[in-house]
Image (spheres, rainbow, N blue to C red):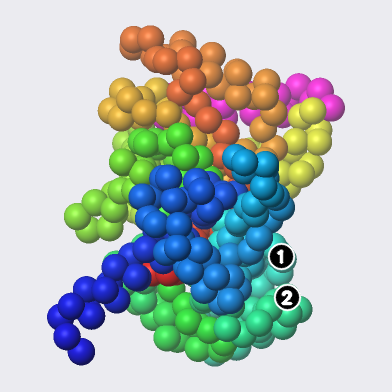
Amino acid sequence: MTTGSMTTMEVKKINRHNIYTFIYQQKNSSKQQIVDSLHISLSTVTQNLKLLEAEGLVEKAGYYQSTGGRKAYNFEIVKDARIAIGIDILKDRVYIVAVDLYGMIMEKCTQALGFLTNENYYQKLGDLVSDFIRNGNWEPDCLLGAGIAIQGIADEEGTSVNYGPILDNYGLHLSTLAQYIPCQCHLVHDSKAAALAELWHDKDITDAAVLFLNENMGGALIRDRKIYQGENLRGGLLEHISVDPQGELCYCGSRGCLETICSANKLRVLSGLTLDEFFQKLRGGDERLRGIWEGYLDRIAFAIRNLQVILDTPVIISGLLANYMTAEDFEELKTLVTKYAPFPFPRDFLLAGQYGPLAPAIGSALFFIDKWIQAV
Ligand SMILES: [Zn+2]
């Protein structure tokens, strides 16, 4: 093979990638739009579209009236030409989702399964995922892999946990955890996965802090549309910002971390109720619960005030509690943050997350979707 033909092949590959990703980003595009936007000849675009159609990656999607009165086709990508699985492992249950190439949920399930680091657990996890894949009836070739979101900091390669006091899973290796899962897997810290899901679906975000108000609190930072990792992969662990050195002991060993005052667990402990019961009674006008909830919002507001001072970015409220929060709760939170603000904050500093408790599972699946689209 000559150098010249190599270059031609590379150009072909780049054209194909650019045409596919253009249609992907536009969602719906005509041949002429591709020609005009990418400055590629009509014959090259036609040839590539034929190949992409033959591979089942692109499809015709309706007509539009082209100049000269002729009808021409629009093109879209085949959204489910590839799919990825996302698994979120929690102390007492597992969330599993399948997402398409746009990261939209196709199937989801929740299963009670107490986390343990033993063979029996790994087998049960593998069985759950295998059943989920079987029920989805997807072509074997279209499954890209399974992302696993876990409470614990995963290493850069996504192969092991190198900090995990919540599940006591320090040193847990992917090859052990995922040994019965019938596809390629990748491990990711649950908060970072959830931040990726929120980022993926909101193209307007450049920088943000994300607070996950889950049973355990989680946090992550988004900088320049990337999840901020820090030098030791511990960047953005907002839940361990300590606001009271004499406060309650956190699982990390420190006192007064945001985890000890802003986690959803805290609401359960203070009220003695499940979250469903808590919010049902709260909305029914229970005065005692109103007091607990207002105190909780007040502490979250104080945390957001401090984040705003350092970061000067929007704060996204996601996770379990975000699903229970009403527009009035968000307004109240905004008012409280403004009360604590040392200087005026912009009006729109507070955003509601889109995915609630499923954000980590979705985000973990996106690893495989993103990798595939980069390489197509
Ligand atoms: Zn802590």
Could you tell me the amino acid type at mark 1?
Glu
Q: Position of residue 57 (x, y in %)?
A: 57, 69
The residue drawn where x is 76% and y is 29% is: 282
Q: Which residues are magenta?
A: 284-303
Could you tell me the amino acid type at mark 2?
Gly
In front here: 70 or 249? 70
Label 1 residue SS: strand
Q: Position of residue 196 (x, y in %)?
A: 45, 51
The residue drawn where x is 24% and y is 51% is: 230
Rounded to the nearest angstrom, the CA distance separating label 2 from label 1 is: 7 Å
Above or below, 59 against 7 in this view is above
The residue drawn where x is 42% and y is 86% is: 175
Q: Which quadrant of the rendered structure holds the N terminus?
A: bottom left
Whether residue 308 appears in magenta in the rendering, the answer is no
| Disc 2 to disc 1: CB gap under 8 Å | yes
Q: Position of residue 117 (x, y in %)?
A: 50, 80
Name the mark on residue 314: none
Q: Which residue is mark 2?
A: 136
Quadrant for residue 104, please give it.
bottom right
For residue 260, side relative to residue 233 (left or right): right
Above or below, 93 against 239 in this view is below
Q: Which residue is mark 1?
A: 107
